[in-house]
Amino acid sequence: MTLLKARREEKREREEEKEKQLKKDMEKKGDDDDEETSDKQNDQNQSKLKASDIYSDDSNSSDSDTSNSVKKSNRHFFDSDSDTNEKKVHYITKREELNKIRLSRFKMEKFVHLPTFEKTVIGCFVRIGIGNYNGVPVYRVAEICDVCETAKVYQLGSTRTNKGLRLKHGTNEKVFRLEFISNQEFTESEFVKWKELCNTNRIPLPTLDELEIKVKDIKAALAYQFKEEDVEQIVREKERFKTNPHNYAMKKTSLMKDRDDAQALGKVEEVLRIEQQLSDLEERANHLDKMRTSTISSISYINDRNRKRNVEEAEKAILEELKANKGKKIDDPFTRRSTKPCMKFRAKTNSAVDGSMASEVEESKTDAEINDIKNDSSSSKSNVMKGDDLYAVHDFDIDLNIQLPI
């Protein structure tokens, strides 16, 4: 910005010098004409002249003529040199030319953390919103004069910052936050109004050379290659504007480590500052925990209420169904049926087979009774022998020849 101001001041000084030179030349020409007329009048008044006077006048007049001719030739020479050295200055005359160095809010979001942010934006133009008139938003063309920090930390797209721009519209200057910058191009009415305001206040418009310089600066900022130092600076700046850290535990441990280092070095003020940060961090963590638990308790209350309501509705539905069916059970195809397994077989119809089967069954009954008697006697014996020998408990006979019905 200082370079642009210096260039414009130099242009003003050159124009003023040119005007002064033109005035001086006009005055000199008038003085020369007055001298010539006075010389003629003196020649007419003097009737008797000496030869020495005549010759001296001729020599003086010739010397004056030569000196005037030399001065005029020198003046023309310097004028021609100044015309050749100074190029013709072309100013911005179209809206499209000014839009080339217009910065939108999207570009500001990209440039805000760049190390070359101030150099890039100063000298560019923005479309700034100044309020509403009859419900219609009003915008103005403004030139960026300086970059400063505001007292408020605000959200700019996906990032947070506290930077502001000192904007100039005519002779008025004011600081605006980046969030009020428009993404749209300048309209024709806004451009004409700005141009008329500059002409009335005798403010020179930007030249095409300055426009080319700012276009190059914008392209360089868009293609900027970040260095390691730049990344560290961006990370520090973003952390400075964060309200809540991503990980409270990591933030707390880092602050405690910094506090211990400051205590070891004897930095009392640094220790107090870090302890204040730790207390603020604890307060924010407790507040967020309360908010989280409050939502959980409310959700659990809603779930319990819905569960009780479902049970009550199910009981009502069962009672209504019983009343409608009058105690009768109706098969529901969607309910599970109780099933019990049962063994089924087919008996033979032959009478002879039935008789043989009956005799065999009677014989098996008699054999079973005999075996039971034997077992009872053996069990009594074993009970008697239990106290003497434990192995006798397992000493018994088993009859494996059991006749089963075929």
Image (cartoon, rainbow, N blue to C red):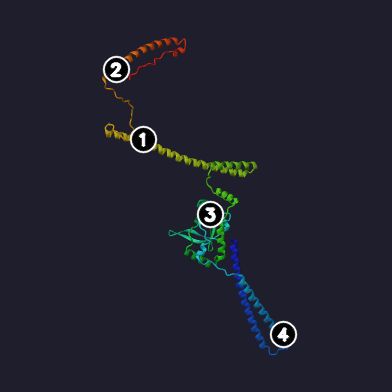
Residue 311 numbered mark, or none: 1
Q: Evaluate whether residue 310 shows in this view.
A: yes
Q: Amino acid at mark 1?
A: Val
Considering depth in this image, is 277 or 37 the residue closer to the camera? Answer: 277
Q: Please tell me whether mark 4 or mark 1 is closer to you in this view.
A: 1
Judge the density around disc 1: few (<14), some (14-19), many (≥20) Cα neighbours within 10 Å. few
Label 1 SS: helix
Along the polypeptide, which appears first: circle 3 or circle 1? 3
Please identify, in this view, whether the residue under mark 3 or under mark 2 is nearer the observer: 2
* Label 4 – label 1 distance at C-alpha: 138 Å
Q: Is residue 207 visible?
A: no
Whole-number angstrom distance, CA of label 2 to CA of label 1:
64 Å
Residue placed under numbered mark 2 in the picture:
356
CB of mark 3 within 8 Å of CB of mark 4?
no
**Residue where numbered disc 3 is placed:** 110
The part of the chain drawn in magenta is: 54-59
